[in-house]
Image: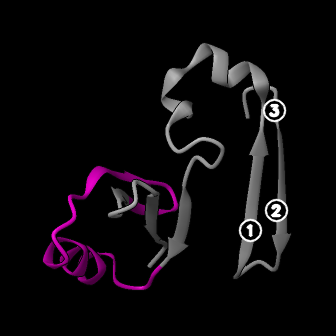
Amino acid sequence: MLGGHTIHVGTDDQYLALYTNADVKAADPSFRKGEPMNHVAMIVDDLDAVEAKVVAAGLKPFGHDDYDPGRRFYFFDWNGIEFEIVSYS
């Protein structure tokens, strides 16, 4: 992505994705959030149920996006760590 390097460690169902690109940080300030970690992503079966739990916990979902092959949203936890919740169902 954008001339950087991505490494996926794991299986087709569970993996850790690591991405780095010094040029992206300089060009796009949105990548600076949560330095040195941009965000943590989790795959779930029921996106709406997880979003309801996030809201019930007093957190604010944002960045909803439907894309091929799934749907997602983001939120920041109480420590300012950004999470991406994805469903391919």
User: Which amino acid lies under the numbered mark 1 shown in the image of this protein?
Assistant: Leu
The image shows residue 12 at horizontal and vertical percentages of 76, 77
* Position of 18 relative to 9 (above/below): above
Instruction: Please tell me which residue lies in front, 19 or 70.
Output: 19
**Which numbered circle lies on residue 45?**
none
The image shows residue 89 at horizontal and vertical percentages of 44, 79
User: Which amino acid lies under the numbered mark 2 shown in the image of this protein?
Assistant: His
Residue 37, magenta (yes or no): no
Residue at 20% of width from left, 58% of height from top? 60
How many numbered tags mark residues here? 3
User: Which amino acid lies under the numbered mark 3 shown in the image of this protein?
Assistant: Gly
Residue at which label 1 appears: 16
Q: Secondary structure at mark 3?
A: loop
Tag 1 near tag 2, CB within 8 Å = yes
Q: Residues within 10 Å of mark 1 (few under 14, many from 20)?
A: few
Q: Secondary structure at mark 1?
A: strand
How far is mark 1 from mark 2, CA to CA? 6 Å
The image shows residue 64 at horizontal and vertical percentages of 30, 52
How far is mark 3 from mark 2, CA to CA? 13 Å
The image shows residue 17 at horizontal and vertical percentages of 74, 60
Residue at which label 2 appears: 8
Between discs 1 and 2, the one toward the N terminus: 2
Q: Quadrant of residue 31?
A: top right
* Position of 18 relative to 42 (above/below): above
Q: Residues within 10 Å of mark 3 (few under 14, many from 20)?
A: few
Is 77 placed left or right of 24 in the picture? Answer: left
Residue at 53% of width from left, 72% of height from top? 42
Residue 56, magenta (yes or no): yes
Q: Which residues are magenta?
A: 44-72
**Which numbered circle lies on residue 4?**
3
